[in-house]
Image (tube, rainbow, N blue to C red):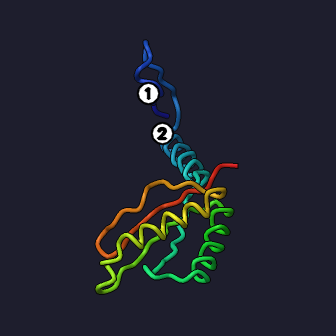
């Protein structure tokens, strides 16, 4: 048996006589349970090109709706290849249109940001 300090900030400090190994084991077990109960966020990615056609846009929009209804975040990005980086405005317009279409299912966490050859935007699901 050991003397274990339970609350050092209390006046006077609170101590308990317990088996120290069992005390450590119980603490690890409680932390593991809390970690298992914590919500895990899933991020699904959807890739566009700067000249994405209407049908492809709608197809990807429907996938995004499904992901948002499942509770996942959606990371939409426009990938610029070669000289298509000249159409940055077109990519931004595409992403903003995408967010407007998904307005009732999710809200944007950040506005479109250009990182290298990708213009990225993250959309979080709306709470029910």
Q: Secondary structure at mark 1?
A: strand
Where residue 113 sits, quadrant-wise, is bottom left
Residue 49 versus residue 93: which sits nearer the camera?
A: 93
Circle 2 crowding by C-alpha within 10 Å: few under 14, some 14–19, many from 20: few
Which residue in the protein does label 2 denote? 20
Q: Position of residue 57 (x, y in %)?
A: 57, 77
Circle 1 crowding by C-alpha within 10 Å: few under 14, some 14–19, many from 20: few
Residue at 49% over, 63% down: 96
Q: Position of residue 94 (x, y in %)?
A: 48, 70
Residue at 66% over, 73% down: 62
Residue 101 versus residue 14: which sits nearer the camera?
A: 101
Name the outermost residue toward the top. 11
Which circle's residue, 1 or 2, is located before the other in the chain?
Answer: 1
Q: Is residue 8 above or below residue 110?
A: above
Which residue in the protein does label 1 denote? 5
Q: Is residue 82 above or below residue 33?
A: below
Per the rendering, the mark at residue 103 is: none
Q: Is residue 103 above or below residue 44?
A: above
Q: CA distance from mark 1 to mark 2?
A: 11 Å
Residue at 62% over, 76% down: 58
For discs 1 and 2, the disc positioned in front in the rendered view:
1
Residue at 43% over, 75% down: 78
Q: Position of residue 38 (x, y in %)?
A: 57, 51
Left or right, residue 16 beside residue 11? right
Q: Position of residue 99 (x, y in %)?
A: 55, 62
Name the outermost residue toward the bottom. 82
């Amino acid at each position: 048996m050991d003397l274990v300090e339970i609350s050092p900030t209390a006046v006077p400090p609170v101590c308990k006589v317990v088996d120290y190994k069992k005390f450590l084991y119980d603490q690890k077990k409680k932390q593991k349970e809390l970690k298992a109960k914590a919500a895990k966020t899933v991020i699904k990615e959807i890739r566009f090109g700067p000249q994405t056609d209407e049908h492809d846009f709608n197809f990807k929009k429907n996938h995004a709706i499904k992901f948002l209804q499942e509770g996942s975040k959606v990371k939409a990005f426009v990938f610029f290849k070669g000289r298509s980086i000249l159409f940055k405005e077109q990519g931004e317009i595409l992403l903003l249109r995408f967010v407007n279409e998904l307005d009732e299912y999710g809200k944007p966490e950040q506005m479109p940001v250009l990182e290298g050859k990708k213009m990225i935007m993250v959309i979080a699901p709306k709470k029910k």
